[in-house]
Amino acid sequence: MKEIPIWEKANLTLEEAAAYSGIGTGKLREITNDKNCNFVLWVGRKRLIKRRLFDKYIEQAFSI
């Protein structure tokens, strides 16, 4: 099976998003627990990060 690079994936796991952004998984969990978080996708109990919206969030954030 061919591995897709993280920067080409549409949705990332918490571990992939942490490696991609440099933000820890604990902080990502804290951010995505918010009901108004628009870049989280819930698949059952699993949370995925929508990469494009996450990039926009990081660009607009003053501090995390």
Image (cartoon, rainbow, N blue to C red):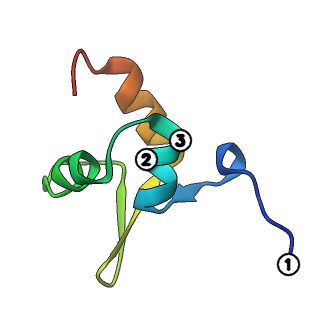
Relative height, residue 43 to residue 57 (above, below): below
Relative height, residue 21 to residue 42 (above, below): above
- Mark number displayed over residue 1: 1
Question: In the image shown, does 37 or 1 lie closer to the viewer?
Answer: 1
Q: Residue at x 53, y 41 (%)?
A: 20
Q: Position of residue 49 (x, y in %)?
A: 43, 55
Which quarter of the figure has residue 10?
Answer: bottom right
Amino acid type at circle 1 is: Met
- Mark number displayed over residue 18: 2
As measured in the structure, the alpha-carbon distance from the residue carrying label 1 to the one carrying label 2 is 23 Å
Q: Quadrant of the N terminus?
A: bottom right
Relative height, residue 28 to residue 61 (above, below): below
Question: In the image shown, does 60 or 21 lie closer to the viewer?
Answer: 21
Q: Residue at x 31, y 53 (%)?
A: 25
The residue carrying pointer 1 sits among few (fewer than 14), some (14 to 19) or many (20 or more) residues within 10 Å by Cα, namely few
Relative horizontal placement of residue 14, taking residue 34 as reference (left or right): right
Amino acid type at circle 3 is: Tyr
Residue farthest along the bottom direction in this orientation? 44
Residue farthest along the top direction in this orientation? 62
Question: In the image shown, does 3 or 32 lie closer to the viewer?
Answer: 3
Q: Position of residue 64 (x, y in %)?
A: 22, 28
